[in-house]
Amino acid sequence: MDPLRALVRTARMARHTSRLAVGLPADDEVLLDAPDERLGPALVAAGRGDHTPAAKLLATTREAAEWENRDRYALRLAAFAHARDAWLRSWRRAAPRDPDVLLIRAELAVARGWRSPARAELLREAGPLITAAAEGEPRDPVPWRIALDHARGTGLGHTGFERLWTEAVRRSPHHYGCHVSALKYLSAAWYGSHRECFDFAERAAEDALPGSLVRALPVRAAFAYLIDGGAEIPRARLDRAADGAIALSAEYGPDDPWPAEVRNLLTYVLVRLERWSDALAQLRVIGPYATSFPWDRVSDDPLGQFLQLRDGVRLEVACSIPLWERRERPTRAVG
């Protein structure tokens, strides 16, 4: 960069960066993976060893067929149990065949298997727990999402995977978690390719219901490509994926925790595409809801990475704004 351009860039940063912070929460107001108002009390009680609120929460999602909420809550409760499981053990003793405790046990077993050096052996041992969870509530697609994650780790072939996928979508055709698991299986990092991943994501997004997070699948495919590299995907396809996710984000209100992960993921993709103004717009609607994914893929400190990226995006946008706004000259009256 020549000295004059560097000087202009620095001047623009100094003039515009601070005002671009308007509308963004302060760093100490940003939360990582903040639970919603239903999950929060269940986690607090679990921390005290009391499983009752978690049991009531999952029972409610099961009885009301809230499969998307059920999946999110099962993931968060299993992650909590990975570190502190006294509450889960007491729940299991009190109701060993409860469909909800079976679900958490299956998710926890698969998650532990993925984290272990003995992954293949532990995942094989998790198979009966997944079967028990599926039999505990035959309507529930969430055990089949867990089965899809399990299949990826155990190297199940495409035929077996298709069988699991059929069972999952028969229960909930537009279930976001099941689609994400299938997308991972089809990714270039596992048993497919970037092209297969994009094809699957775009077909699913086209078929998805209005407001469904499934419409953001192409931006997940873009993320996988940008993280892993490999065979070239045209820039236009990446931009189209980002545009679709921007349109989906606009269907939700600012500071809404429900689409927070999709918005965080979209922001990462927009930054990699150097679409700085669009990235800043997403940071504004994310508000205080930072999520571990995708930042934990690029840093051991996902919250710090998110906050650092916010600053970087503001600097890039500031550098694109002219030092002085041009004002239109008033037109003289004729006559």
Image (cartoon, rainbow, N blue to C red):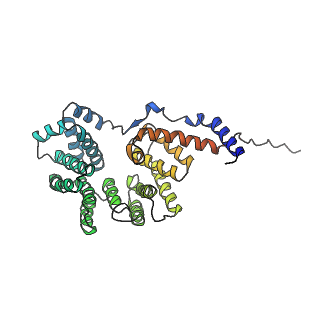
Q: Is residue 262 above or below residue 83?
A: below
Residue depicted at x 38% and y 43%:
292
Residue 81, picture quadrant:
top left
Q: Is residue 285 above or below residue 239?
A: above
Quadrant placement of the C terminus: top right
Q: Is residue 166 above or below residue 16?
A: below
x then y, percent, for residue 121: 19, 55
* Residue farthest along the right direction in this orientation: 335
Residue 167, picture quadrant:
bottom left
* Residue farthest along the front direction in this orientation: 117
x then y, percent, for residue 317: 59, 43
Relative horizontal placement of residue 180, taking residue 28 as reference (left or right): left
Q: Nearer the viewer, residue 274 or 327?
A: 274
Tag count: 0
Q: Nearer the viewer, residue 203 or 44?
A: 44
Residue depicted at x 44% and y 55%:
227
Q: Nearer the viewer, residue 237 or 244?
A: 237
Residue 59, picture quadrant:
top left
Relative horizontal placement of residue 88, taking residue 36 as reference (left or right): left
x then y, percent, for residue 237: 50, 62
Q: Is residue 48 above or below residue 116?
A: above
Q: Is residue 243 visible?
A: yes
Q: Is residue 212 visible?
A: no
Residue depicted at x 44% and y 38%:
304
